[in-house]
């Protein structure tokens, strides 16, 4: 085989980047993989903006089936996004014996089992490096480089929008809403930012990482998901005073022969490998029984980093085709003994608590008594500045506590006549205090 032909579906920001890179780097790719990779056809509902991509008009189509039914197209690159029609197009491509490369995290997270089964059935490759971490090669690492490791944990900062907002809040002393507006002004956040700031984008990526790292496919509704809307500047400041930062984390880890999978803001000790992953950058911490702790770090989104991952997948598929070894790397594996998913109520961790109370004698003792009755011990406590209305924040760190016990305790604390508003609780992701 001298040439591999690529059909591209979707000519948005990433699609345009991939198209231009395939054209500009054709010679480099040929040198490095030993055969020519040609952009044969491009499909989008709109004609490309003049000057945005340099392809002859005869290679452009508005009909995806022109690509899907062309016997000379070997690899279909899906960059449409969303569930439909992307899912239908990918299934059609696979059934036609075409290999597929996609960056579609939502589709892989929600329908990966169906797509992977189809790829296996038709003996073709389905690659999706760009679905998690932008230009960070975490998918390849989990599927190949760390294949001999039994993983203990995958913990990631995998949403650049949220990480940018939390970084701005800490570094510039901005509120959540001010930081979100700045992220939108710089193009780091969409006008409707709910997918990012409510944690759903992170959950999609965690579902993929959990499947690859632990061989455990999970429905998205099984992943406990919280966003960052409730993180206040005050909480970031208090955490900073105690030597912690607050990050939105994707967490999958073995605990007592069970698997914890959750997305939520968390306190990280400043010594943690992820603590200095700031701005729009992503970081993914992996701990394996052979390699120990590793950190994968880089730009988690954007045209160029994502293009890099898509082209890496195209190159891998082209090499497989050249040597007749499709399915050399299984799309995803299922553990023969999948771990039981630990219920959220059963997780144990340390907690940061901020309770707004009326400043009067005995209040702290009452709160401590409620926590004690629910088997929650206090590691540290501080009562912050007195305010005009005599409402003060009491900030506490607990020792390890069970989630169910904490929820029961907080419902009692929030019902006290001396409590104002709902208690803020943020879990800690750090070595446990014993």
Image (spheres, rainbow, N blue to C red):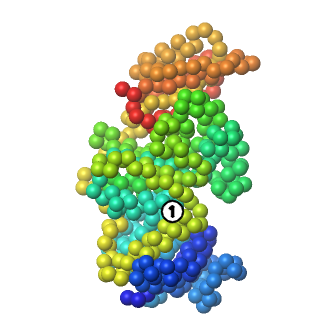
Name the residue furthest top: 361
Residue 211, given in percent of the width and then of the height, sits at: 37, 56
The one of 173 and 217 positioned closer to us in this rendering? 173
- State the residue at coordinates (43%, 75%): 315
The one of 359 and 129 positioned closer to us in this rendering? 129
Residue 91 visible in this rendered orientation of the protein: no
- State the residue at coordinates (59%, 77%): 20
Residue 114 visible in this rendered orientation of the protein: yes
Quadrant of the image containing the C terminus: top left
The one of 52 and 256 positioned closer to us in this rendering? 52
Name the residue furthest right: 388
Residue 108, given in percent of the width and then of the height, sits at: 45, 63
Q: Is residue 423 above or below residue 12?
A: above
State the SS at label 1.
Answer: loop
Q: Quadrant of residue 117?
A: bottom left
Name the residue furthest left: 336
The one of 165 and 198 positioned closer to us in this rendering? 165
Q: In the displayed structure, does residue 208 sit left or right of residue 8?
A: left
Quadrant of the image containing the N terminus: bottom left
- State the residue at coordinates (40%, 82%): 34
Crowd rating for badge 1 (residues with CA inside 10 Å; few <14, some 14–19, many 20+): many
Residue 283, given in percent of the width and then of the height, sits at: 49, 51
* Residue carrying label 1: 135
Q: Is residue 161 above or below residue 172?
A: below
Q: Is residue 180 above or below residue 148?
A: above
């Amino acid at each position: 085989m001298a040439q591999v032909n690529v059909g591209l579906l979707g000519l948005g920001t990433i699609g345009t980047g991939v198209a231009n890179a395939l054209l500009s780097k054709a010679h480099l790719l040929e040198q490095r993989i030993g055969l020519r990779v040609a952009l044969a056809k491009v499909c989008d509902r709109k004609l490309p903006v003049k000057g945005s991509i340099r392809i002859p008009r005869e290679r452009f189509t508005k009909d995806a089936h022109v690509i899907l039914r062309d016997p000379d197209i070997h690899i279909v690159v899906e960059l449409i996004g969303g569930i439909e029609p992307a899912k239908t197009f990918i299934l059609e491509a696979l059934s036609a014996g075409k290999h597929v490369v996609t960056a579609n995290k939502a589709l892989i997270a929600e329908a990966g089992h169906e797509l992977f089964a189809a790829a296996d059935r038709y003996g073709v490759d389905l690659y999706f490096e760009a679905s998690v971490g932008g230009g960070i090669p975490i998918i390849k690492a989990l599927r190949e480089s760390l294949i001999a490791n039994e993983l203990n944990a995958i913990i990631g900062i995998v949403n650049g929008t949220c990480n940018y907002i939390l970084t701005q809040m800490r570094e510039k002393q901005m509120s959540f809403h001010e930081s979100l507006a700045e992220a939108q002004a710089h193009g780091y956040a969409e006008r409707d930012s709910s997918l990012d700031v409510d944690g759903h984008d992170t959950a999609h990526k965690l579902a993929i990482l959990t499947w690859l790292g632990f061989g455990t496919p999970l429905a998205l509704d099984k992943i406990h998901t919280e966003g960052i809307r409730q993180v206040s500047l005050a909480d970031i400041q208090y955490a900073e005073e105690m030597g912690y930062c607050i990050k939105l984390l994707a967490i999958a880890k073995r605990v007592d022969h069970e698997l914890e999978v959750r997305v939520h803001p968390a306190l990280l000790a400043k010594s943690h490998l992820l603590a200095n992953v700031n701005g729009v950058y992503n970081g993914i911490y992996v701990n394996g029984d052979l390699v120990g702790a590793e950190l994968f770090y880089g730009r988690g989104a954007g045209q160029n980093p994502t293009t890099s991952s898509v082209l890496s997948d195209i190159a891998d598929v082209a090499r497989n085709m050249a040597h007749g070894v499709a399915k050399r790397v299984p799309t995803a594996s299922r553990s023969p003994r999948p771990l039981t998913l630990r219920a959220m109520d059963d997780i144990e961790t340390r907690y940061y608590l901020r309770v707004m109370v009326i400043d009067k004698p005995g209040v702290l003792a009452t709160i401590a008594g409620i926590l004690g009755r629910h088997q929650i011990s206090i590691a540290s406590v501080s009562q912050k500045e007195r305010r005009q209305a005599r409402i003060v924040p009491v900030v506490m760190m607990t020792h390890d506590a069970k989630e169910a016990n904490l929820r029961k305790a907080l419902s009692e604390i929030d019902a006290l006549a001396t409590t104002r508003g709902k208690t803020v609780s943020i879990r800690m992701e750090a070595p446990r205090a014993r």
